Every structure is written in structure tokens, then in C-alpha cells.
Amino acid sequence: MDQAKIKELKKISLDIKLGAVEAVYSASSGHPGGSLSISDILAYLYFVEMNVDPKNPQWVDRDRFVLSKGHCTPGLYAVLALKGYFPREDIKTFRQIDSYLQGHPEMKHTPGVDMTTGSLGLGISAACGMAKAAKYCGKDFRVYAMLGDGELGEGQCWEAALFAAHFELDNLCAFVDYNGLQIDGTTEEVMNTACIADKFRAFNWNVIEIDGHDFCAIEAAVKLAKQTKGKPTMIVAKTTKGKGVSYMENSADWHGKAPNADEYAQAVKELEAAKAELDN
Amino acid sequence: MADIKKIATRDAYGSALAALGEKYENFVVLDADLASATKTGTFKKKFPSRHFDCGIQEGNMMLVAAGIAATGLLVPFASTFAIFAAGRAYEQIRNGIGYPHLNVKIAATHAGISVGEDGATHQCSEDIGTMRTIPGMTIISPSDAVETAAAVEAALNYVGPVYIRLGRLAVPVINDADSYKFELGKGVVFADGSDAAIFATGMMVDSALQARELLKAEGIDAAVINIHTIKPLDEELVVKYAVKTGAIVTAEEHQIIGGLGAAICETLSENHPCPVKRVGMKDKFGKSGKPAALLEEYGLTPADIAANVRAAIAMKHK
């Protein structure tokens, strides 16, 4: 990946972050921390990798993305708006009555949302179903899924892990947003999911460990996943919760909290400054 | 008396899938290591590549089915025992299938106490209740093998989530295979009557017909109505027979809380209040035993239905 592309993706990622923070601020509700930690991966998937058509969101041969950690809708809606699935200004309606932008992803009313999720552990299973259907029907679309590290406490994730390996779903590429924090504290304190990579290797997945904020690493991992035959891929992406907003970084407190007006202004200032710096 | 042909509705389900497999190429079948018991094995034998065994993981299976349906490419039938579908995987069905209204068919066998020897853990008598609370869920509870075959095809042709309730025990075939037509959401009047109406579902329809004969000997004329679609309920027919007879009895192999009896009481209390007696499990768990002995112990026999008809008629004269 050349420097110009990296710069472009960094800008998109910052725009996702701005959209995510605006959504949460407008709603006075939502989950900023985990939305910011996955912004770089979302930027890469939607603006480089995934074969999708925002003008035809139901296109049957499209690649799919399942946000298994469904509470991170602010990030998902921001990237979908940037991609052109719906107007950017609608982000302001997030979580409001009459909005199609529900608190958690809802596939029937939101263009670009491929699966209804939000109850943790369910999305990765649905991604398995999509990948299995693609294989059965001889379709070559790929299925991407995003899991939280806290989400791995759900037993269903491990049912899905068995299933995907058993059926050799090499058209499935999942990520763990390994930011080390969940609602009640660090994953280490609350329910230790450490050695995530080893766990998925033991489940017979192709496992790649990366810095989830390094676009070159994300690209290399996704390419490697596509080349891997006979196994699903898990990209364990080390990330920073709240990435890009200083006071949200590495704070479990910002898992599901909305900023006040001053905090919102501060977040926008920091993110806009980062964008301006890219052009210097 | 000639031998009555008996077939379990789970057997009819497996046979129906195998027969429909040729006519329809758009469906696949999922199971959770129970193919020999749910009878999806019958389909698997004929269409091995269209049968996905998910192993013992019902929660995952429901969302795999949801993901398959979400692609718009295929219709999945997800099969397991009722307790593991409507019980263990309730939340998966509610959030992953019901909320997005996905085109998934859930076939739940081993419903009710007639499971027998396996005992309370496997005798699901709460599934109509849990599934009925999910907005937009269709619930079908066929009375025999003929109706099961027709219901499976109807479910396949309907777009949206369907829960099909099936039994383990071989039960009499009471519908005529040549003339039977299944209409989703419509009750079937098996026998007309003027003194009382028995609304029954599943294997209890046959018991209700037997109860009708017992009552006939006493000069009581009871209608028997088969409610194969519990949701959406044929409210028009329920009210019609409440108006006509003024005494209603419901019969189901399920808890009286949350099931067919509850659904009918809800409809009647809002539209035409009248005496209702409910035959079913009375807030109790089952236990191991032979199906016939269990049905007797828990008050689910034709004699029990007849006694409840007499009681309902007595209430209307109060």
C-alpha cells in the first residue's frame, strides 16, 4: 500500500470517528469506545476490500459484513454513510424514535446492514451461515465479521468457531477487536479471554495477529485470509479502545457513554486536527 | 375394528422433506446431531449435500439458519427437539430470526409429554408459549402425518419464520391423504356440534374426536375443531363456535399457561366471553413413563376432555 492510499484511509477512518462521535452525541446514547477502535478496519474493508454496491445494497453476490459486536453501530453507520448507503446527515437521527438507525444493527430497514445483531455471540454464527450458503450455492462472495474481545465470553462464539472450522469456511474472515476492555473493566479482570490467537488456532482456524490500526498489516492479513484454503481466518487485531479521542482512549468508562457538549467539542477538535495534520 | 394406521409427525416431517426435496431445490436442512430422532435423516439419505449437521449446538444452528436465510439464496429448515429450539435457543430465535423476520423454518420434534421415557428434561410443554410471544412468528402444530406433510410444504411456500411443532409418538392418521388441503391460519371443523366446542391441536385432535364419541352416547353434541395453526389464530372460527355453543374446551399436549388454551381465552375474553375449560399440563413438569400412562396421569385422555366438556356445559347453565 502506498503512502497516498494510507493517507486516504487515515482520513476516511477519521471521518468514521467523527461520524461515530456525532451519532453518540446526537443520541446522548451509544457506544463510542468500540466504534473508534474498529474505525481503521472498517475503513479498509469498505473502501478497499469489500465488493459492494451502495446503490444496490441487496445485490446477492456482494461481500457481507456482520458486526457481531453489534453495539458499535456508531462506527458502522458512519462508514455506511461515507460509502453512500444513506445521507450523512441522517447520522444525527441515531437512536431517535422514527429513525431507521436503530441502537443495534437491523438489516430490514437500514441500507448496507447485512445482518441484525446486537445480542453478543449471534453475529458470528450468522456469518458462518452466510459463508456456508455461499459455498453450497457456488457463490464466491466473502463474509467478514467483527467480534469484540469481551464478546468471546459468550459460549456461542465457540460453537461458531467449531462450526466454521468443521465446514472449512475459508470464505469467512473474522476479526477480534482486541482492545482489552469491556463494560465492567479489563477483559483480564472481568473474564480473561487471553491467548485469543492460541484459542482459535486450537479450533483449527488460520490465525493472524496484527496491529489493528496499521493499514498495511490489515491489508496483508486480509490478503492472506483470501489465499488460505480449507480454514476460516481469524484476524486478532490489537486495538486501542476510544482510538483518536484522547480522553476516551483505553477507558472502559467510554464503552457505552455519550460525551457532553464540551467533551464532544473536544473530540471534534482533536479529530479535525488529526485530519488537518495529514494534509501538512 | 380395523387397525388404525399410526405414524409419528416427526416421521412424516422427515418423509415430507425427502419428498419435497425433488420438487424444490431452494431448501436445505440443518440438524443438531439428532437426525435419526428428528427424522431429517430420511432427507439426508436422499440429499446428503443438502443436509448440514451442526453438531450439538442449537444456539449456533439457529443463527447459521438465519445467516443462510439472510443471503436470500436458500430456505433453511432447522431441526432439533422442541426443548432445545424453543427453550435453549429462545433468544437466538427471538433476536436472530424473529426480529429480522427471516425466512427460517424451525421444526421442533419431541414436543409434549408423549416423549415418554426420557422424562421432564426432554418433554417440552412450554414451546407454544415461548414462540407465541415472538412478534410475527407463525406456529403450526399438525394433528397427524397427512397434515404434517401439507404443513411442511405450506411453511416452505410462506415467506417468514415458522415454528412447526412435532411429536415423537406414533399417532393415528385422521386426515384423508387424497382430499386434505392445508390452509395456513385456518381451523378445521372436524365435526360440527351445538352443545360445546372442543378446540384441539396436535395429537389431541384425535383424543378430542374420541371424547366426542363418549359424549355422544350421553346425548351431548360437541364440535371438534382442529387448530393446526396456533399463530396466527383463526379468531373468527373461535368466536363463531363460542357464539354457537356457548361452552368451549381446549386440548393440547402443552402447559395450559401460554398455549392454545391461553390463546383462545385471550381471544374470547376480548371478543365473546364464555366458559372455557382447558385440558393440558397444569403447571407441572412431566416425568419418565410410557406415553399412555403419562397422558392419563396428567389428565390428557379422551375421558378427561369429555369431563371438561361436561364441566364447561355446566358453567354455561349457571
Image (spheres, rainbow, N blue to C red):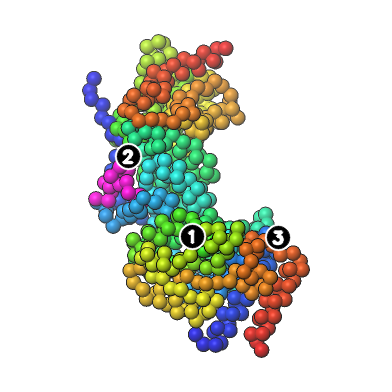
Task: Name which residue lies at 35% across and 54% down.
Answer: B54
The chain that hosts pointer 3 is: A
* Residue B160: mark in rendering: none
Foreground mark, 1 or 3, reads 1
> Same chain, marks 1 and 2?
no
Quarter of the image for residue B83 reads top left
Label 3 close to label 2 by CB (< 8 Å): no
Percent from the top left, x then y, of residue B267?
A: 56, 31
Identify the residue shown where x is 50% and y is 61%: A192
Give the residues in magenta. B27-45
Quadrant position of residue B107: top left
Q: Marks 3 and 2: which is nearer the front?
A: 3
User: Front-most of B308 and A10?
Assistant: A10
Query: Residue B241: x percent and y percent?
Result: 50, 24
B215 vs A271, nearest the viewer = A271
Is residue B159 in the magenta section? no
Please state which amino acid type lies under the numbered disc 1. Answer: Leu
Residue beneath disc 2: B10
